[in-house]
Amino acid sequence: MPKNKLKKFAELNSFSNVLQPQNIHTGINPFQFKGKWGESFFCNTNPIVLEIGCGKGEYTVGLGKAFPNKNFIGIDIKGDRIWNGAREALEQGLHNIAFLRTQAEHINSYFDKDEISEIWITFPDPQEKKIRAKKRLTSPLFLDRYRKILKPRCPIHLKTDNVSLFNYTLSIIRDEKHYLLESTDNLYADAQINEPLLKEIQTFYEKRFLAQGKSIHYIKFSLHEGSS
């Protein structure tokens, strides 16, 4: 492992805004902040927003700066990536920002029913092979996981450069009768999309895609009130 990565991992262990659970949490062995993130970690009752697959945490940090009356948690399995956002948040004294190092499929082990008020999915792996469709972060399997932690009618945002993932997500929303709130296949050419900071905050990958002349696709939707 490169020395720079080792240094980042060592620093990550000392960051007060990063949680790196070592055990598999179950009903018998529950995660200490599940259902208690507001009162026990952030020490407030403000809404909690997740960025799933946060990478370097650009949205987690950018939104955290802009909305101090909300709490933001970036989730990613790669510690050398979240190190960037976690360090920036600490350096700027942003106490409404945290990072959870875990795989996205385990989110129900860390958050309780109606604990989350909003979800961002920014430039995820599109998992284009059909056999990996269940791995897509907007697959029915993942949407069911979100339903178990997301308050009713609260929004999910997807930003992607991948037209296949964009069209797939629209088809899932239609077929499962979720609520499509906004969508565009060319975000920066669409003057009708007015989500706050949607165009102002850009991830590392988004900047790369824009430099390559790619269109950025965006969807905002909420889930139907199915069983959870």
Image: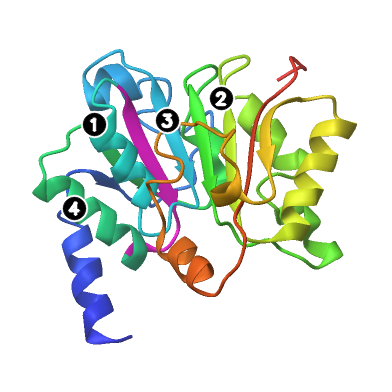
Q: Nearer the viewer, residue 55 or 164?
A: 164
Do residues under tags 4 and 2 come within 8 Å of each other at their CB atoms? Answer: no
- Dominant SS of magenta comes to strand
Instruction: State if disc 2 and disc 1 touch (CB < 8 Å).
Output: no
Q: Amino acid at mark 2?
A: Ile
Q: Which of label 2 and label 3 is nearer to you?
A: 3
Disc marking residue 96: 1
Instruction: Residue 149: give its label.
Output: 2
Q: Secondary structure at mark 3?
A: strand
Residue at the (71%, 32%) spot, across then down? 144
Residue that mark 4 sits on: 88
**Which segment did they paint magenta?**
70-79
Q: Position of residue 167 (x, y in %)?
A: 80, 50
Residue 220 lies left or right of residue 90; in this view the side is right
Dot placed on the residue nearer the N-terminal end, 2 or 3:
3
Question: What residue is shown at x 56% (from left), y 16% (from top)?
Answer: 151
Residue 79 horizontal side relative to residue 158, left or right: left
At x 26%, y 20%, the residue is: 69
C-alpha separation, residue under disc 4 versus residue under disc 2: 27 Å
Amino acid carrying label 4: it is Glu
Mark 3, other Cα within 10 Å: few <14 / some 14–19 / many ≥20: many
Query: Vertical placement of 97 versus 105: above or below?
Result: above
| Amino acid on which disc 3 is placed | Val
**Magenta stretch contains residue 71:** yes
